[in-house]
Image (cartoon, helix red, strand yellow):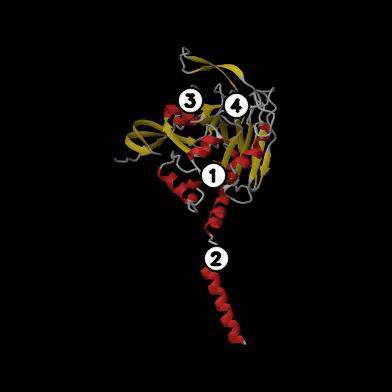
Amino acid sequence: MEKLLVLSVLTLLALSVEEGYEFECYDITNTMEMQGRTFNGGRACCGIAANGKRRCGRENEWNIYQGHARFCNIYEDAQQAFNNHHDLCCDSPLIDNCGACKSFHVWDFESVEDMVNQHPVESWINNTDWRDDYYDGELLDPLSRDIYPAGYINAILRDQNKPPVCVYVRNSGGHVIEVKIEPESEGSTVCIGDSLDDQADKTNPGFTTTCDAAQLTTCIQDGTLKTTFQFPRNANGNNIETRNEARGFTFQITCQHGCLEQDDLPLWLRVRWSTKGYEDQVETNAFENPEMFCEYVNRDYPEWDLFPTDIELVTQAIGEDAPSSSSTLSFFVTLLAVACFLI
């Protein structure tokens, strides 16, 4: 398919974005491919998605909210947003709280079991080239969802946290959540913090910010309760769903210090959460108690208790064969011959 050069233009949409946030629009004069999608004329825009990655789409897939360009549709639920490779708007009824995050990356799995079943250990544990495979594949298809080393996804924390990495986790409100983060660069202190606007939601205390310069692990007890709310599914207001559920868990990742000036920080992150929530009827034992989740998840899935850089160490350990009996015998014969020579 012929790829034609396009002319970058400034539009009212692009001009309304706050300074320091990357966003631009293009007039497409014919047919072109961009990020695995085909555009037949019209106008396309590219900006930074909630996971920090550059994302391109039709101009009407973008909207400006409080000076921030975001790739989301307020009438989409989490599953629709995920299927369409969109983010989830902060003013969606599923979140309804806009602080530093104006949109959220929809976490790629619906449960721990979903992650384990889709990407079992054997799909990544013996691959020392998983990092090259991931980045090479992303160059060919930025929307590919083929490689999840130990269930981690890749994100980019942009310079000066503009924007932070923002994540929405489905089916997790009112549960216990484990989050692991590992930056690609050593010495960069990253933090996971509450994404809620304290002024907008004074009833939810959120959680304490946790930081680390190498490998960050935190276990969060989310106090979100089930509630009944209205979810408009179109702009006309003639399709409104009534839902009774706990809104999903959200968080943001920022750089505290050590990040290079005017540079971006790639990182890996993973989320796991308890099957049962605080409002669910649970048995009074440690195996079902949500508060014990961060302990028993590693008991149930011990091979998953690692960071991306650990995969290479585990793989190397698996690949190291123990000395065979023949090689051991050969060694002792050689040693005996040397001893006799010296005598």
- Of badges 4 and 1, the one in the foreground is 1
Residue 98 appears in view: yes
**What is the quadrant of the C terminus in the image?**
bottom right
**Could you classify mark 3 by the number of other residues whose Cα lies within 10 Å: few (under 14), some (14-19), or many (20 or more)?**
many
How far apart marks 3 and 2 lie (CA) works out to 59 Å
- Of badges 3 and 2, the one in the foreground is 2
Residue 140, how many percent across, how many down? 40, 44
> Label for residue 212?
none
* Mark 3 residue type: Asn
* Mark 1 residue type: Ala
- Of badges 3 and 1, the one in the foreground is 1
Residue that lies at the very extreme toward the bottom in this rendered image:
343
How far apart marks 2 and 4 lie (CA) works out to 59 Å
Q: Earlier in the sequence, mark 1 or mark 2?
A: 1
Left or right relative to 214: residue 30? left
**Could you classify mark 2 by the number of other residues whose Cα lies within 10 Å: few (under 14), some (14-19), or many (20 or more)?**
few
Q: Kindly identify which residue carries mark 3.
A: 73
Q: Kindly identify which residue carries mark 1.
A: 150
Q: Are marks 1 and 2 in contact (CB under 8 Å)?
A: no
Q: Earlier in the sequence, mark 3 or mark 2?
A: 3
45 vs 189: above or below: above
Residue that lies at the very extreme toward the top in this rendered image:
238
- Of badges 1 and 2, the one in the foreground is 2
* Mark 4 residue type: Cys
Residue 99, how many percent across, how many down? 62, 28
* Mark 2 residue type: Pro
How far apart marks 4 and 1 lie (CA) works out to 31 Å
Q: Secondary structure at mark 3?
A: loop
Q: Kindly identify which residue carries mark 2.
A: 323
